[in-house]
Amino acid sequence: MLSAEEWGIVALSLKVGGVAVLATLPLAFALAWVLARYRFPGRLLLDALVHLPLVLPPVVTGWLLLVAFGPLGPIGSRLQEWLGVTLMFRWTGAALAAAIMALPLMVRAMRLSIEGIDRRLEGAARTLGAGRWHAFRTVSLPLALPGVLAALVLGFARSIGEFGATITFVSNIPGETQTLPLAIYSALQVPGAEAMVTRLALLSVALSLGALILSEWLVRRTHAERARHGD
Amino acid sequence: MAIDIDVERRFGASVIGAQFTAEAGLTALFGPSGVGKTSLLNMVAGLLRPDRGHIRIGGRTLFDGATDLPPEARRVGYVFQDGRLFPHRRVKANLLYGWRLADPANRWMTLDEAADFLGIGHLLGRWPQSLSGGEAQRVAIGRALLAAPQILLMDEPLSSLDAARRDDIMTVIERIRDELKVPILYVSHDRAEVDRLATQIVEVGK
């Protein structure tokens, strides 16, 4: 059904998306936790910064990444000098761009579920002998799990659909940074590649739809489970 | 087991506090709603910090100017008004939550003994959401007892139950008082309940 080249595009997209969400998850969870639980000066600003990639033109996000992570950028030059790592024009750079674009969605999903946790359950755990960390691991985290899973799925879907920031930051290099949307864009420029465009586009629709349904199902499953045992 | 409590905490314009000593048995903190009886229990449990005062139980200082033990180090079993069972754990795992965390040398009850004492052996595989109010309160009491506490705090444990269940749970509480001989601090605003259960009454909010 798909050619070897197309399979390569799909595999690269999955790799970029997978690495992006897994690497972002701890940071996104920490941000969600802090925004859900604490009131502090600058909270509004932090909230706005987290959501910025959602509303900023992706090309601007990509340009900012270029400025920061390019060979002369403040972060890029140090990564190169100290670790010998370059992100520009590499699939790792595509993962970074995807991660930043996925971050707001991931934080939102987890924050909702953290806000839904009855904090008095943590107090109950403490009186039963659990330290802060143990109460977090055995009570808060399991109760936030549906949100974490939904965040992974949504973030993944967002990552494999990323276009603007990616093409600006890491360009469109077949086999290295050419993910699904970039490949569709390239194929659109070539006469006679309509069949390939159709196949890749349908694949994109299927992946996105599947992710949305899966994440909705994960959230509902918990509610359903509670309701089922509720009476 | 001597209980010596003298605490005070300011909430905006009002001050919540109490000063009393008690021996073993069931000490009722009795008073109308809204005078901060639950806050007093939260201070004893370590969930709420008093502005000043001390909390000593059986020669151990849980709180004074220099000491402020975290809740997990206080060995205080807390039975909440609403049970507050962990919704993501079955009854058995709820019961064993504190037991597993307790120092084995301090444990004084096994799961089987607790299940037997409270008549909840048939509920072990159930989810908390599937329990009736009376069943949930029994499990909550068992969970607190199994955590090897030196004292039990009970916050209106009968308030969400119908008359028949109330009588059941009152019998359970009497047996904890008389057979297990665990000292109990018991918050209530119900005169009849207090008259039946208490060995000592502390009026709060007067």
Image: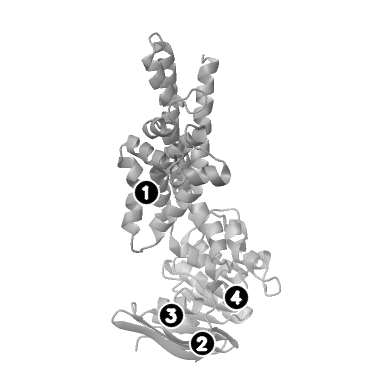
Q: Specify the quadrant that holds the N terminus of chain B.
A: bottom right
The amino acid beneath tag 4 is: Pro
- At horizontal 52% and vertical 44% (from top left) the residue drawn is A79
On the image, numbered disc 3 is attached to which residue? Answer: B40
The picture places residue B48, in percent across and down from the top left corner, at: 44, 75
Q: Are marks 2 and 4 on the same chain?
A: yes
Element at label 1: helix
The amino acid beneath tag 3 is: Leu
Q: Nearer the viewer, mark 2 or mark 4?
A: 4
Q: Are marks 1 and 3 in contact (CB under 8 Å)?
A: no
Q: Are marks 2 and 1 in contact (CB under 8 Å)?
A: no
Q: Are marks 2 and 4 in contact (CB under 8 Å)?
A: no
- Judged left or right of residue A129, residue A212 is left
Q: Are marks 1 and 4 in contact (CB under 8 Å)?
A: no
Q: CA distance from mark 3 to mark 4?
A: 18 Å
- Judged left or right of residue A182, residue B150 is right
Please report, as a chain letter, where disc 4 is located.
B
In the picture, the disc for residue B167 is none
Q: Quadrant of residue B206?
A: bottom left
On the image, numbered disc 4 is attached to which residue? Answer: B149
The picture places residue A222, in percent across and down from the top left corner, at: 46, 46
Q: Is residue A83 above or below residue B137?
A: above
